[in-house]
Image (spheres, rainbow, N blue to C red):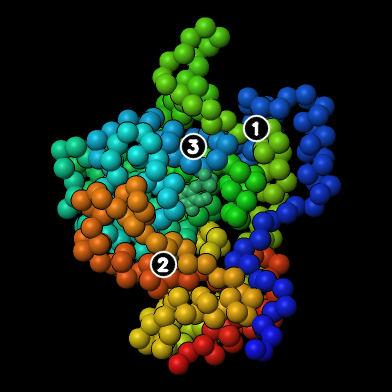
Amino acid sequence: MSSPRFSEPIYVTRPLLPPLDAVQARLAEVWTARWLTNDGAQTVALTEAIAGHLGAPHVSLFNNGTIALLAAVRALGLTGEVITTPFTFPATPHAVSWSGATPVFADIDPVTMTLDPVAVEALVTPRTTGILAVHVYGIPCDVRGLQTVADRHGLKVIYDAAHAFGTTIDGVGIGTFGDASMFSFHATKLFHTAEGGALACRDPETRALVDQLKNFGILNQEEVGPVGINGKMNELQAALGLAVLDCVPEELRKRQAIIARYRERLAGVSGVTLMPEPSGVRSSGQYFVIRIDAQAFGRSRDEVHEAFKRENVMTRKYFFPLCTDYACYRDLPSAAPGRLPVAGRVVQEVLCLPLYGTLALDDVDAICDLLTGFRR
Ligand SMILES: Cc1ncc(COP(=O)(O)O)c(C=O)c1O
């Protein structure tokens, strides 16, 4: 057997690590303040910085994105049925189920891979209270289409914007659409706090309720209002986040150069579709995803994934399988495969290619050469 193209594994992503001395300087401030959690100076500063970065004024920081999503579902009073996408990370439907509501899965758009507003509207019943849509890979949902459906039926809209930190539509921050948007700051995200997340809320009232909910529902020293949870970001996470945020513009520039190289090298390869670049959209640079049409390419996505692995390139089949294939959801009526034909096709085709700032352009070229070489 010949040796792999890369002697060391090339992972799909690598965490963005700021210079250690920048992190240490922030940590020194935490030590001086002797304040480790509950809205310390680092959390206050990061909240302001994130709100400015996202162009979304009403931001609340969390210990992770999943708890933020739970708080959004609770704050907006979603009960009964919530329409969502099967093509996502399990945290999305879990946030609905953990809140005691039922996720109802609707099909996705064949190009953007995000919830199809027509499919959503067809599933609205008297029990429906909201829509939980995902800007998958940072590609914006049809925000106007979904809002139209929501307005017509009196529904709330939550966006899972875990992948969409920094995405804008015609210059408008993605976190300003819908009633609330969740951002994940997990280590695999371009901007991260190791673990963490945020909710961008439509108005200050929702943000105030969310702030209560993430702190056990505590109103003051003697009163608890709503049934809350512990979702607070701590000062160590926020200090790391402030140091990471300083590195985000440079990381994004490097990722954009890598994405441009992938696009240049892979454009026109028969059987390969590149993730869409909708006009007016600034991308988050979170993922670079291709789709493999097995017939036209001569090899299936799974074969390409395995072939890359043999060359030490660790691509990922994000998001495979569909959430509707998991044991906890597969028996729901809306999970029947025949009802989700587009998602069923897309999930067999998608492949995430390596993307992180320190990935050399020569390595990107080598990955593209490998891919074109796999074609039959
Ligand atoms: C689409 C999506 N939603 C939710 C989450 C969960 O976010 P967190 O890991 O911050 O809880 C993730 C993954 O991290 C995700 O990819």
Most distant residue in the top direction: 222
Could you say where residue 372 lies in the image, as x and y percent from the top left? 52, 88
Q: Is residue 206 left or right of residue 371?
A: left
Q: Is residue 225 in view? A: yes
Q: CA distance from mark 3 to mark 2?
A: 30 Å
The residue lying toward the viewer, choosing from 76 and 13, is: 13
Most distant residue in the front direction: 1
Q: Amino acid at mark 1?
A: Asn
Mark 1 residue CB less than 8 A from any atom of ligand 1: no
Dot label at residue 234? 1
The crowding category of the residue bearing disc 3, from other C-alpha atoms within 10 Å (few below 14, some 14 to 19, many at least 20), is many
Give whichever of discs 1 and 3 has the lower sequence position.
3
The crowding category of the residue bearing disc 2, from other C-alpha atoms within 10 Å (few below 14, some 14 to 19, many at least 20), is few
| Image quadrant where residue 28 sits | top right
Query: Can you identify the residue that label 3 sits on?
Result: 67
Give whichever of discs 3 and 2 has the lower sequence position.
3
Give whichever of discs 2 and 1 has the lower sequence position.
1
Could you say where residue 333 lies in the image, as x and y percent from the top left? 20, 51
Q: Is residue 51 in view? A: no
Labels 3, 2: front one: 3
Q: Amino acid at mark 3?
A: Ile
Mark 3 residue CB less than 8 A from any atom of ligand 1: yes
Query: Can you identify the residue that label 2 sits on?
Result: 278
Q: Please tell me which residue is depicted at 24% across the width and 49% down the height of the picture.
A: 332
The crowding category of the residue bearing disc 1, from other C-alpha atoms within 10 Å (few below 14, some 14 to 19, many at least 20), is many
Q: Please tell me which residue is depicted at 66% across the width and 71% down the height of the picture.
A: 10
Mark 2 residue CB less than 8 A from any atom of ligand 1: no
